[in-house]
C-alpha cells in the first residue's frame, strides 16, 4: 500500500502529464512535423518547472505506454521507477515496477 507521500508524488507526475497532454493537443494543430515543443518535466517534484524540448513524435512515443513519463536527466523519480530510455535531452522512466 502506498503512503500518503508516495500518492502525492504520483499525483505530481500525473498533473504534469495532464498539462503536457493539453499542450500536445494544441500543438498538433499548429506545429510542423519534427519541430520541437516545450513540454514540462513530468518528475515527482511539485516545484519543478523545467521544460523538455521534444517533437510531437517523441512525446507520442513516451505516451504510447501509460506507465511512462518523460523527465529531465538527474531529476527525482519514485523508488522502483526505472529508466527505459536515456538521451542527452530527456529520460523516459517507467513506473511498472513501483509498488
Image (cartoon, rainbow, N blue to C red):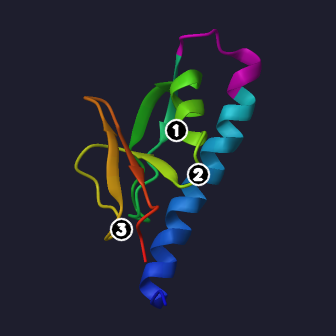
The kind of secondary structure element at disc 1 is: helix
Q: Which residue is mark 3?
A: 78
Residue 60 in the magenta stretch? The answer is: no
Alpha carbons under labels 3 and 2: distance apart? 15 Å
Q: Which residue is mark 1?
A: 62
Q: Is residue 58 above or below residue 20?
A: above
Q: Which residue is mark 2?
A: 17
Q: Which residue is found at the position 54% from the left and 11% from the top? A: 34
27 horizontally vs 89: left or right = right
Q: Residue furthest right?
A: 29
95 horizontally vs 57: left or right = left
Q: How many marks?
A: 3
Sequence-wise, which precedes: disc 3 or disc 2? 2
**Quarter of the C terminus within the rendering:** bottom left
Viewer-side label of 3, 2: 3
Q: Residue furthest front?
A: 97
66 horizontally vs 74: left or right = right
Q: Is residue 84 above or below residue 90?
A: below
Sequence-wise, which precedes: disc 1 or disc 2? 2
Query: What segment carries the magenta color?
Result: 27-35
Amino acid at each position: 500500500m502506498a503512503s500518503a507521500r508516495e500518492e502525492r508524488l504520483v499525483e505530481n507526475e500525473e498533473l504534469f502529464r495532464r498539462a503536457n497532454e493539453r499542450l500536445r493537443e494544441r500543438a498538433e494543430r499548429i506545429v510542423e512535423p519534427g519541430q520541437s515543443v516545450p513540454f514540462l518535466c513530468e518528475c515527482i517534484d511539485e516545484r519543478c518547472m523545467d521544460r523538455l524540448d521534444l517533437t510531437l513524435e517523441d512525446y507520442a512515443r513516451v505516451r504510447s505506454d501509460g506507465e511512462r513519463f518523460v523527465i529531465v536527466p538527474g531529476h527525482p523519480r519514485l523508488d522502483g521507477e526505472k529508466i527505459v530510455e536515456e538521451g542527452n535531452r530527456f529520460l523516459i522512466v517507467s513506473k511498472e515496477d513501483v509498488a
